[in-house]
Amino acid sequence: MASICLSNPTFATPFLGKKISFRENSKKTYAFVQLGRTRCAVDTPFGGNVPTFPRTRVWDPYKRLGVSPDASEEEIWGSRNFLLQQYSGHERSEESIEAAFEKILMTSFQHRKKTKINLKTKLKKQVEESPPWVKNLLSFVELPPVDVILRRLFLFAFMAGWSIMNSAEAGPAFQVAISLAACIYFLNEKTKSLGRAFLIGFGALVTGWVCGSILVPNIPSILLHPTWTLELVTSLVVYVFLFLGCTFLK
């Protein structure tokens, strides 16, 4: 019986016409596996060649995203979304794009904050340098929270709409009376003085009615609705003065 050599077996193949060494074949297979092995799991996840962001080392965040420093917010967002979609799957590229985007957002926030502070400083400086009568006038004015302004604006706008809808049936006297009562209530809640609240409320009513009586006749009739009377348009001016009085005066 022929002996079998296990140390270095060879196989003959009729198709190739030559013998293939087992050791030689194993070395070639191992070299092929080593050659095809990925260098970095992050660069080629799940066995695919993912494109790499070429500007990861660019320090300027605007140049890294490919936008100008004067670009709008929509352009910056669009460039960021486009780059993330183009280099999706490459972790280092995505981190570089997001870092540049966040740096631009932080820079924009700091610039807005600085501008706002500078604006307040300039206004404060102008008030300090203004004449005494201007300072005394501004001492009676305050700026309430935005939600307070919106609620009171809605109330007086509703009164104005109610007066316009009932203009054909009756005058706006009832709506003006309710608006005056609301104005006095808000002022009393703010100043804690009913007498001061009545004084400011009636002062706003009288001032608004006088200004409306003077201004409304000078408005071209083409700008007004044909069914609007002088009393109705004057009441609309009164609503504005009542809103300003109970919201910004103290």
Image (cartoon, rainbow, N blue to C red):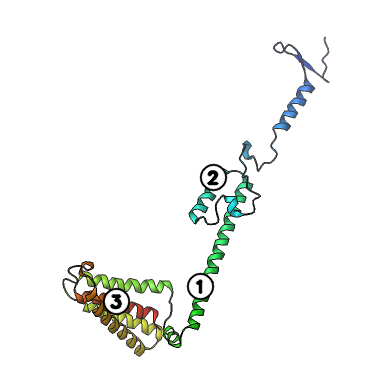
Q: Is residue 102 left or right of residue 14?
A: left
Q: Which residue is mark 2?
A: 85
Discs 3, 1 touching: Cβ within 8 Å: no
Q: Position of residue 200 (x, y in %)?
A: 34, 85
Q: Are marks 3 and 2 in contact (CB under 8 Å)?
A: no
Q: Is residue 131 above or below residue 153?
A: below
Instruction: Tell me the SS state at disc 2.
Output: helix
- Element type where label 1 sits in the image: helix
Choose between 93 and 178: the one closer to the eye.
Answer: 93
Name the one closer to the observer, 17 or 102.
102
Q: Is residue 210 above or below residue 105?
A: below
Q: Which residue is mark 3?
A: 239
Question: In terms of depth relative to the viewer, which is nearer, 129 or 95?
Answer: 129
Q: CA distance from mark 1 to mark 2?
A: 40 Å
Which picture quadrant has residue 10?
top right
- Observer-side mark, 1 or 2, equals 1
Residue where numbered disc 1 is placed: 119
Between tags 3 and 1, which lies in front? 1
- Residue positioned 26% across, 74% down in the render: 236
Q: Position of residue 66 (x, y in %)?
A: 56, 49
Q: Earlier in the sequence, mark 3 or mark 2?
A: 2
Earlier residue among tags 3 and 1: 1
Please report the residue visible at 29 percent of the width from the left and 82 percent of the height from the top.
205
- The amino acid type found where label 2 is placed reads Gln
State which tag comes first along the sequence, 1 or 2. 2
Q: Is residue 109 above or below residue 97?
A: below
Q: Position of residue 244 (x, y in %)?
A: 35, 78
Q: Amino acid at mark 1?
A: Leu
Q: Is residue 190 left or right of residue 53?
A: left
Q: What crowding class fits label 3: few (fewer than 14 Cα within 10 Å), some (14-19), or many (20 or more)?
A: many
Amino acid bearing label 3: Tyr
The Cα atoms of the two marked residues, 3 and 1, are separated by 31 Å
